[in-house]
Image (cartoon, rainbow, N blue to C red):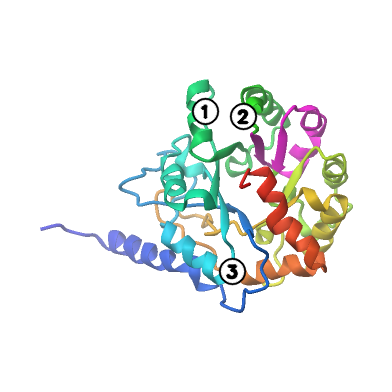
Amino acid sequence: MLMMTRRDVGRIAVSALGATLPMAHASAKDVSEMPAGACDCHVHIIGPAGQYPMVPQRGYTPPEASVSDLHELRRRLGITRNVLIQPSFYGTDNRCMLDALAQLGDSARGVAVVAPDIGDIELAELDRRGIRGLRINLESGENRDPRAAVAALDAIAGRIGHLGWHIQIYAALPVIAAAADRIAALPVEVVIDHFGMAQARDGIRQDGFAALLDLVKARKAYVKLSAPYRISRQAPGYADAAPIARALIAAGPDRMLWASDWPHTDRVPDRPPLDIHPFRIIDDHAVLGGLAEWCGDKALERTILAETPAQLYRFV
């Protein structure tokens, strides 16, 4: 007989609870006004754990979030396209994302994380399977060294230009600002995650934000207007993030992308990394509604939600 400890039972209960959270606060409403081809540019597919093992040295362990769950979120939000992003807990093993891309077909693209010694034939195969960029993930590991960002940028840029790919950077705002000159000089496009991690409480005059705006104005970077809960504590509306969002949109409306960051992974303080860390409870529809408030214009919303991602990720 299989014996289970109280700790094992607790893990299963938390996992089951967490698995319901991606949908719990994606409120349903009329989505008929969403533009054709609307794209959520930052989501993750997670699990099953037995099929896609996570790296042993990870910062946290999330519950599962399936392609079926993503289809339900699409229905609720009126989204028809997605960009799948390789999360930190899978390291350079992109199989979960690639298998999800195969299920989603032409309605999805991906951004991968790869080993430094990956071959050109392997990169070409990733392109065939829907990958359109490579991710540099510094912030998940709390790496705030600008030299690490510059070294990673230089190592990647020369490998992907012929594929028409971009580099996606998840880094703190001071790191982005310190690396801004190098970003501007790159021969490939750059996408910056989550408002560049500009902190809402510090406003548009915070250190480093001007450098981010300059990159956008010079058409040297795209910025994801994604996961406002990562930069603001004023849930559910994240009102203090509005000035930052509007400043970025004004700097380059066609350099903005929208994303939910579903299924809202989180690290629970003091919880062991190998225990399940439940998803954050986020109202995805309210987050999407924030974009309408920041834009104030349906044509601008259509640019951000549909036209720009269609071009960048080669949906058309």
Q: Are marks 1 and 2 in contact (CB under 8 Å)?
A: yes
Number of other residues with Cα within 10 Å of mark 2, as a class: few under 14, some 14 to 19, many 20 or more: some
- What's under tag 1, amino acid-wise? Ala
For label 1, the SS is: helix
According to the image, label 2 marks what residue? Answer: 163
Spatial CA distance of label 1 from label 3 is 33 Å
The residue located at (84%, 49%) in the rendering is 252
Task: Determine the image quadrant of residue 65.
Answer: bottom left
Q: Position of residue 185 (x, y in %)?
A: 80, 27
x, y (%) of residue 69? 45, 63
Q: CA distance from mark 1 to mark 2?
A: 8 Å
Q: Residue at x 66, y 49 (%)?
A: 310
User: Which dot marks residue 124?
Assistant: 1
Packing grade of label 1 (10 A; few <14, some 14-19, many >=20) is some
Residue at 49% x, 54% y is 270
Q: Residue furthest bottom?
A: 29
The image shows residue 164 at horizontal and vertical percentages of: 65, 32
The earlier-in-sequence mark between 1 and 3 is 3
Q: Which residue is mark 3?
A: 77
Q: Nearer the viewer, mark 3 or mark 2?
A: 2
